[in-house]
Image (spheres, grey):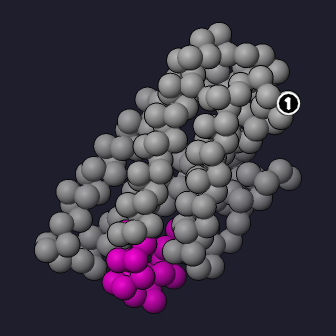
């Protein structure tokens, strides 16, 4: 079983720490994309591109679902209007939509690099890869600086248990469908 499938089948015991760890992996993916943008024919580019593709195809959709389907709604229940979370979550959902557009454009060039070829349009790939990494870093800074600390303050023990249960079930369902 490869690392992505192990991750998908993982039992989530401490959900906020799990999300925090996932954010660290996203930072690694951003750095890998930036490296591929500048050196798409580097010695380890094919391996790096495959790592990025595995993340984008397997882990990122689960993480987005963890946030949009579970964490954000729980926080909305626990926070007041003065926290202005509706507007903040709308912004994050909009960023996820922008991410999707860039992801679609990154798929083919990443597959080309993973197949030991230079992308057909390397300058377009570089622009999109850097734009995606930039969006992700801004998104991560906001989540790590605002959302996760707020969740640590406001979510109850029952919320943590429910969040862990739902995140685990999502990964188990994902590993079954693979």
- Between residues 97 and 73, which one lies in front from this camera angle? 97
- Between residues 153 and 44, which one lies in front from this camera angle? 44
Q: Is residue 117 left or right of residue 146?
A: right
Residue drawn 63% across the image and 73% down it = 12
The x, y position of residue 43, in whole percent, is 85, 30
**Tag 1 secondary structure:** loop
The x, y position of residue 114, in whole percent, is 77, 27
- Between residues 91 and 168, which one lies in front from this camera angle? 91
Rendering quarter of residue 25: bottom right
Residue drawn 18% across the image and 66% down it = 84
Quadrant holding the C terminus: top right
Whether residue 16 is visible to the viewer of this picture, yes or no, is yes
* The magenta stretch spans residue 50: no
- Between residues 93 and 176, which one lies in front from this camera angle? 93
Rendered view: 60 above or below 48:
below
| Residue at numbered disc 1 | 43
Whether residue 174 is visible to the viewer of this picture, yes or no, is no
The x, y position of residue 103, in whole percent, is 52, 32
Q: Residue furthest front?
A: 38
Residue drawn 61% across the image and 37% down it = 34
Dominant SS in magenta: helix
> Which portion, as a residue range, is magenta?
147-167
Category of crowding for the residue at label 1, using alpha-carbon neighbours closer than 10 angstroms: few (below 14), some (14–19), many (at least 20): few
* The magenta stretch spans residue 166: yes
Rendered view: 141 above or below 119:
below
Rendering quarter of residue 156: bottom left
Q: Residue furthest bottom?
A: 157
The x, y position of residue 159, in whole percent, is 42, 81
Residue drawn 44% across the image and 67% down it = 144
């Amino acid at each position: 079983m490869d690392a992505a499938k192990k991750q998908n089948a993982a039992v989530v015991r401490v959900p906020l720490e799990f999300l925090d760890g996932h954010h660290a992996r996203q930072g690694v993916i951003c750095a890998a994309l930036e490296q591929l943008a500048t050196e798409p024919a580097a010695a380890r580019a094919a391996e790096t591109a495959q790592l990025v593709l595995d993340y984008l195809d397997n882990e990122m959709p689960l993480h987005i679902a963890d946030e949009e389907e579970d964490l954000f709604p729980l926080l909305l229940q626990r926070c007041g209007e003065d926290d202005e979370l509706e507007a903040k979550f709308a912004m994050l959902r909009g960023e996820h939509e922008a991410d999707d557009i860039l992801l679609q454009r990154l798929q083919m060039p990443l597959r080309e690099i993973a197949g030991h070829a230079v992308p057909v349009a390397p300058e377009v790939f570089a622009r999109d890869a850097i734009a995606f990494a930039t969006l992700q870093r801004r998104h991560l800074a906001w989540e790590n600086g605002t959302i996760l600390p707020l969740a640590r303050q406001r979510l109850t023990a029952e919320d943590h248990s429910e969040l862990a249960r739902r995140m685990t079930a999502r990964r188990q369902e994902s590993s079954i469908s693979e």
